[in-house]
Image: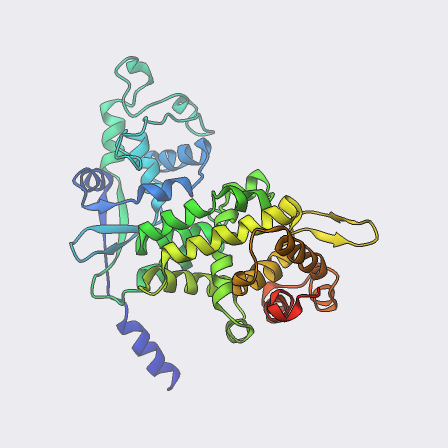
Amino acid sequence: MSLQNEIDLGAKRIHTDGYALSIGELMSLYKDKEIDIQPEFQRFFRWSPDQKTKLIESILLGIPIPPIFVSQREDGVWDVIDGLQRLSTILEFAGLLRDTNNELKPASSLNGTKYLPSLEGKYWQNDDNPELSFDQVQRLIVKRSKLGIQIIKKESDKDTKYELFQRLNTGGTALTEQEVRNCILVMINKDFYKWLSRLSQDENFKATIPLTDKALEEQYDVELALRFFVYKSISATDVNTTKDIGKLLTDKMIEFAESDEFNLDTEESNFKTAFLLLNNSFGEDVFRKWEPLKNKFSGPFSIAAFEVIASGLAKHLGSYCDENESIEQLKNKIKSVSIHKTFTENSGSGKRASTRLPHFLPLGEQIFSNENKNL
C-alpha cells in the first residue's frame, strides 16, 4: 500500500468538527450533563494554585487558550479528552465542579499575579465578603470569552479518542504514562479501572513494593499491578515485535478491559496469591538485589527484578503454596535471580525495558518452573 493510500485510509477513520463556544455556554453544558468530565480524572491532574490562577488571568486579559478536544458519544454527550484541567479549573473557580460522589467541590480562590496582583484571594462569588468576589463585569468577561472546541464525531473509529487522548497527554509533564492509561481505562471500562486500582492497594502487594511518595502519587503502583498481568500474558516475541513497552502495556490493558475472557475473579485470586507468597518470602526485600557475600538484599526496589520474578511466578503460580517447604524453595529461586548471568548482563544503567524483557521473560519462566526445583 502506498503512503497516499495509507493517509487516505487513516483519514477516513476520523470525523471532526470545530467551532468556538463561550465559557458561559460550556458552563451550561456541564450543568445540563451534556459535556462529561470524568470525576476520576481530577486526581491525575495536579495543577498548582498558581497554574490555575494563570489560566483565569489569561482569560481576563484575552490571551488565547488552547482548544478543548471532545469526543461525541452515541447519546450526543461530549467526553472531554484534552483540556480536562483547563475546563476543570474554570468550573472549580465558578463553584460548579462535582466530585466522584456528584457533590459540588468547594469553589477555589486565586493568587495574585505579576500583571493582576489584585487577584489575590478573589473568588468567583463570595456572598460573605463581596470585596473578595469578582464583580458582575469581571464574571461576564469570563463567561463571554470563547474557547475553541474540536469535536471527534461519533462516526469516527472507536479507538480514535483513546489514541488522541494518549497523543495529546503524553510527552509533557502533566501526566505520567500510567495516569494517561488510567484515564483511557476510565473511558473504556470504569469498573476495570476501579478493579485494578483496588488491587494496587492489596496489603501484600504494597508490602513488596517500597515506593516513594512521588511514585505513588504518579500511580506507579497501579502500573506495576498492570505489569503483573501483562507479563503473564506475553512472550519475548511480543516485546521484540513492538519495541515500545509503554504501547504494549496500553494495548494489553485495553485488550483486557474489553475482553470477556479476562476473568476478574480468577485474575484477582492469582494476583493476591502471588503477592502473598512474595511477601511471605522476603517482604519489601523481594525485588531488591541479593548479595551472597553479604548474605542480604540491598539497594532500592528494582524494576528489573520485578520483571523476572513477577513474570516467572505468574506463569508458574500453581507450583507454589504458602507452606514452609514451598516458601523456602521460592526464596532460593528469588535469590538466584540477581546473580544469574542473564540478569547481570541485561540489567543496570542504560538497559531499557525493550532490551531487558526479551531476556527476562524466558529467564523468569526458566527459574520458576517445576523443572528447577533444585534452585
Q: Residue at x 52, y 48 (%)?
A: 220
Relative vertical location of residue 368 with respect to residue 323 in this rendering, above or below: below
Residue 7 drawn at (x, y percent) = 34, 77
> Which image quadrant for residue 265?
bottom left
Relative vertical location of residue 87 with respect to residue 191 in this rendering, above or below: above
Q: Residue at x 32, y 41 (%)?
A: 39
| 291 left or right, relative to 303 | right
> Which image quadrant for residue 64?
top left
Residue 115 drawn at (x, y percent) = 44, 30
Q: Is residue 64 visible?
A: no
Q: Which residue is at the far right? A: 293
Towards the viewer: 105 or 347: 347
- Quadrant placement of the N terminus: bottom left
Towards the viewer: 65 or 172: 172
Towards the viewer: 38 or 170: 38
Q: Residue at x 50, y 45 (%)?
A: 218
Q: Residue at x 35, y 43 (%)?
A: 40
Q: Is residue 58 visible?
A: yes
Residue 147 drawn at (x, y percent) = 28, 46
- Quadrant placement of the C terminus: bottom right
Towards the viewer: 361 or 246: 361
Total numbered labels placed on residues in the image: 0
| 144 left or right, relative to 66 | left
Relative vertical location of residue 152 with respect to residue 149 in this rendering, above or below: below
Relative vertical location of residue 312 with respect to residue 187 in this rendering, above or below: below
